[in-house]
Amino acid sequence: MSTHQQQCEAAIVAGAWDTLLAESMAWSRDPDGAKDPRPLFARNVVYLLQGRFADAWKTHALCLESQDHIAAVGDWVQDLLDRHTECGYVHLIKGLFLAQSGQSEQSLKPYAEAAKLLPQLAYPHYFQAQVHERAGHPEIAIKEYREAVRLVPDFAPARMNLGVAYQDQGRLEMAIKEYREVIKLTPNDSAAHSNLACALAEQGKLEPAVQSYKTALTLNPQDAEVHFALGGLHETRGRLDLAQKSYQDALKADPDFGPAHSALGWLALGKQRLQEAADIFNRALKCNEEDARAYHGIAEIYAIRGKRQSAMENYSKALKYYRNPEKRNQIMNQLFQEGQVGD
């Protein structure tokens, strides 16, 4: 066993994450560890615990994608656990390994053991909540996120995820409270401002939502989704000029952001600029060939031009790809009124 491996293992047992990061990087630089997935996994663990999810994703691709790497890391983690069965931090590491190697359900047991051995540690609850959320158990996820926040009130990622879980259930006031707490803890977190804006918009508080989206864009001007969401708010408020600018800004940030193309197509259609709208809808379909709004818009153009068969073909595609029941019903009702489908 190399010195670097020994020092990494000692850091895990002690829950010394800064030391683990430094030692894992040194292990990877060592000739014997250069192609070893274990130091990369150790680094991945630290990134997850620190909330550095983009970095965690990069290291995951390097150490937990091939079956050989999964086996090597799994053997190491199990051996460490066999030698330290009463160490909560090692159980936590075991849970993280299982969750990231496609065994989420099995990760719940080591997470629970870690929580039992380290009752003041928030991480096991936080990671259990993520597993339950992915498994479609929102109430259990909320319970675990709340426990993580109770243990560590300044645990911003747990508060953010708790807010999202509340919002998914329509509990907007509780979601907004969590997002505001995240903003207090991390004022420069653009995602917290955009999540707050989304929840405010769902409440019908459009002006505060606009301001929160603008704050998010000040912090991250290249976020195409936020530009697009802001454009939707402007459109709802009847500010079509501002909506158009926001959709265009979304495409400057990401030229392949299909929803912005579709939204611009509908604005052009509303001005009866049929050829311009058709061109834009076709650009949207180049970005996403299952874009229901683009097919819907093209169908409307054909209907206006009196090309019934082409209109029906595109209405059918829109119905196929729309996930929103209201949109599907809107098309069906329109077609019934026009006598284009049987009852």
Image: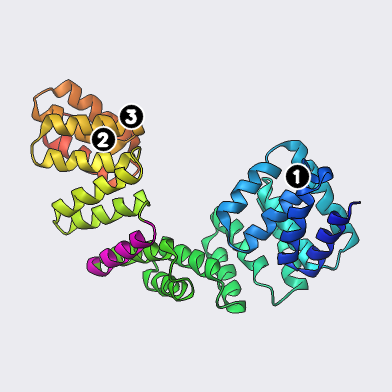
Q: Earlier in the sequence, mark 2 or mark 3?
A: 3
Indicate whether 170 appears above or below 100.
Answer: below
State how far apart marks 2 and 1 are (Cα): 45 Å
* Residue in front for this viewpoint, 49 or 8: 8
In the rendered structure, find residue 37 and report the number of the disc placed on it: 1
Crowding at label 1, few (<14), some or many (≥20) Cα neighbours within 10 Å? many
Residue under label 3, please give it: 286
Q: Earlier in the sequence, mark 2 or mark 1?
A: 1
Discs 3/1, front: 1
In the rendered structure, find residue 294 and report the number of the disc placed on it: 2
> Is any atom of residue 230 visible in this view?
yes
Magenta residue span: 206-220
Crowding at label 3, few (<14), some or many (≥20) Cα neighbours within 10 Å? few
Q: Quadrant of residue 209?
A: bottom left
Which structural element holds mark 2? helix
Q: Quadrant of residue 237?
A: bottom left
